[in-house]
Amino acid sequence: MENRVYNFAAGPSTLPLDVLKEVQRDFLDFNGTGMSVCEISHRDKAYDAVVKEAEALVRELLKVPDDYCVLFVQGGASTQFAAVPLNLMHNGVADYIVTGNFAKKAWQEGQIYGTANKIGDSSDKVYTYIPDLGKLNYTEGADYVHICSNNTIFGSRYAEFPKCKAPLVADMSSEIFSREINVSDFGVIYAGAQKNLAPAGVTIVIAKRELIQNPLKYCPTMLKWKVQDENGSLYNTPPAFAIYVACLVLRNLKKLGGVKAINEIDVYKAGLLYDFIDNSKLFKNNVEKKYRSIMNVPFVTGSDELDAKFVAEAKKAGLVSLKGHRLVGGMRASIYNAMPVEGVKALIEFMKKFEVENG
Ligand SMILES: *Cc1c(COP(=O)(O)O)cnc(C)c1O
């Protein structure tokens, strides 16, 4: 489409064009109901089918075991920072590994409800690595260990996951459906959908059922995963449109060959960009290679002025939202599942030209 740009935003972020067209085509008449999906009751059979299909696709694509629930909830990943302790903190103590801004926020939220021990921290090098997992001091009797698997702002991610006695809880907002995972290695996985899946408004929670039966007594009903599970994510009005789009994106992903297939493409895309940056005299990425994200690629020129010029000129060339997060500056290319290979290639061509002109 002529007036579509390549959108490198970190979230909300680009969605598959085929899905957007499908949404547009069916927007006024959803499945022959004569109503938009935004107008229909969430108790209507036609809509119920959407929630059920979305759940089935999550289960299929991530191979979610039957003793785990799959929930669609609201409030963003940030609300889950509170829901995690409110559902799991029975002994009043949990471990947190702080590898970025969102991991830190989750840890801070955990402190409201009990003892939240920070057992790992990579802030000494601006979160450009993941602490050595073999050297962590897990707390005996901790209710869970919380991690953020991909650090959206700093562009680092876990190469492998901690092996701990307490259930592992992972915020996977910016990488869910981009890499194969073994769900049974986790107690809980949650992810705001607006990075790699859907429009803002829905958050996925995948939780082992036996862990969520006794939420703390002051846990708000809406945050009780058990209640959401018992009601099939329809305890109250769900974010109907966002779940609908998520369902279409997941259908699309299944058609592409699933998580393994998209991971190969994601690794290829990220590899192109990192290779170029590592061989460039102008651009630099500071993340330790082993921990580099395949979703969020931050880079700098070393000059704030040149960075600003880059962002402005890229925008004129149809490559938008490349400004880095305010905490790190520079640039960041978020290259989620929906970013086509051509988009990454166009960015690299633009970077080459910029380097020749400004290097
Ligand atoms: C964006 C993001 C969040 C915050 O998500 P909201 O839905 O805005 O609350 C939390 N964690 C990670 C890893 C993110 O990328």
Image: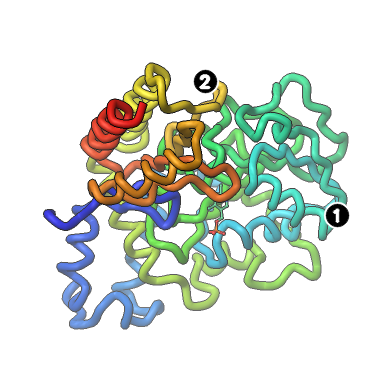
Q: Number of labelled discs?
A: 2
Q: Nearer the viewer, residue 301 or 257?
A: 301
Q: Quadrant of residue 130?
A: top right
Residue named by callout 1: 114
Give the class, few, some or many, for how many residues have Cα within 10 Å of label 1's Cα (few <14, many ≥20): some
Q: Amino acid at mark 1?
A: Gly
- Give the mark nearer the N terminus: 2 vs 1: 1
Q: Describe the element under mark 1 as helix, strand or loop.
A: loop
**Dot in front, 2 or 1:** 2
Q: Is mark 2 within 8 Å of ligand 1?
A: no
Q: Residue 155's spot in the image, x, y percent? A: 52, 36
Task: Indicate left or right for 76 with 146 as reference.
Answer: left
| Residue 122 position (above or below residue 23) | above
* Residue 329 seen anywhere in this rendered image of the structure: yes
In the rendering, which numbered label is found on residue 289? 2
Q: In the figure, is residue 138 to the left or right of 348?
A: right
| 325 up-or-down from 201: above or below | above
Which quadrant: the C terminus?
top left
Front residue (pair 289, 186)? 289
Seen in the image, is 39 located left or right of residue 70? left
Q: CA distance from mark 2 to mark 1?
A: 35 Å
